[in-house]
């Protein structure tokens, strides 16, 4: 072997031994950092025998770490997307449920409004019928006169107007509650002459029997002096010429 070649080989070995490691740039999740890389001995020998420069071997440890972090981030994004989609679906369901409740409430309000309108219409028709009945003075006997009085009371705002039975009325022909909320016993008299004190006595009996607070005698005629005096002493109200 040529001494000069031997000398060059020894210098090369010393040079390679002095720098057994070198740095190469490797990717570590967003930035480049130096990473020591060892040169395999067999590559050194092959370089000596073939007179070719030694090439460095890159390390792949940081690349594996990069892949791990990459898949972790992808998984996080995936779960975030699932959460967002799931939340949006739940919100949509809640909004749909609230919309259905509002529509149901609107339908119920509309139904109540229609019922109220029908009720008012029915009351108006009934009032017109009663007013027509009153205008005709449709009574020819005592019982029809009682119905006439009851109808007029209802038109005047009385409530719970009830006509008692023809027989056994205990002195009250009508039981009704006036607009002030007072329950009254009413005796009706359709007569030609003046009404006497007996009618006052009868309505007092009816007031006690039906547990009323007030007693009233109504007639198409007038009252005698005895009836007027007796009504004052017993708290009975007298209404004459009620036609």
Image: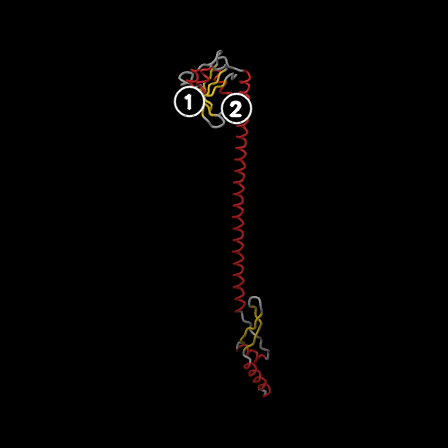
Q: Which residue is mark 2?
A: 156
| 175 relative to 71, above or below | above
Report the colour scheme. secondary structure
Residue visible at 55% across and 20% down in the picture: 131
Residue 232 location in percent, x, y? 45, 20
Callout 1 touching callout 2 (CB < 8 Å): no
| Picture quarter with the N terminus | bottom right
| 61 relative to 103, above or below | below
| Residue 174 seen in this snapshot | no
At label 2, counting other C-alpha atoms closer than 10 Å, the crowd grade (few under 14, some 14-19, many 20 or more) is: few
Taking 126 as reference, is 206 left or right?
left
Residue visible at 56% across and 75% down in the picture: 23
Q: Nearer the viewer, residue 117 or 199?
A: 199
Taking 45 as reference, is 182 left or right?
left
Say which element carries label 1: helix
Q: How many marks?
A: 2
Residue 18 location in percent, x, y? 55, 82
Q: Which residue is mark 1?
A: 207
Residue 94 location in percent, x, y? 52, 45
At label 1, counting other C-alpha atoms closer than 10 Å, the crowd grade (few under 14, some 14-19, many 20 or more) is: many
| Residue 31 seen in this snapshot | yes
Residue visible at 52% across and 51% down in the picture: 87
Residue 42 location in percent, x, y? 53, 77
Say which element carries label 2: loop
Query: What is the quadrant of residue 45 in the picture?
Result: bottom right
**Which is more foreground, mark 1 or mark 2?**
1
| Mark 1 vs 2, N-terminal side | 2
| 163 relative to 78, above or below | above
**Most distant residue in the top direction:** 192
């Amino acid at each position: 072997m040529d001494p000069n070649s031997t000398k060059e080989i020894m210098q090369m070995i010393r040079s390679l031994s002095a720098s057994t490691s070198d740095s190469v740039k490797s990717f570590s999740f967003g930035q480049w950092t130096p990473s020591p890389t060892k040169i395999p001995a067999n590559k050194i020998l092959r370089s000596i025998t073939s007179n070719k420069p030694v090439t460095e071997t890159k390390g792949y440890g940081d690349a594996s770490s990069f892949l791990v972090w990459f898949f972790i981030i992808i998984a996080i994004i995936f779960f975030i997307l699932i959460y967002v989609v799931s939340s949006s679906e739940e919100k949509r369901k809640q909004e749909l449920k609230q919309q259905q409740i509002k529509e149901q409430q609107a339908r119920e309000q509309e139904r109540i409004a229609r019922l109220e309108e029908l009720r008012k219409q029915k009351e108006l028709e009934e009032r017109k019928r009663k007013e027509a009945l009153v205008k005709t003075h449709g009574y020819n006997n005592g019982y029809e006169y009682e119905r006439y009085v009851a109808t007029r009371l209802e038109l005047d705002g009385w409530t719970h107007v009830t006509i008692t039975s023809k027989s056994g009325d205990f002195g009250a022909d009508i039981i009704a509650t006036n607009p002030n909320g007072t329950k009254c016993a009413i005796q009706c008299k359709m007569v030609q002459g003046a009404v006497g004190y007996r009618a006052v006595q009868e309505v007092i009996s009816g007031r006690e029997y039906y547990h009323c607070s007030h007693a009233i005698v109504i007639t198409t005629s007038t009252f005698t002096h005895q009836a007027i005096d007796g009504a004052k002493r017993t708290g009975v109200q007298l209404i004459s010429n009620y036609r």
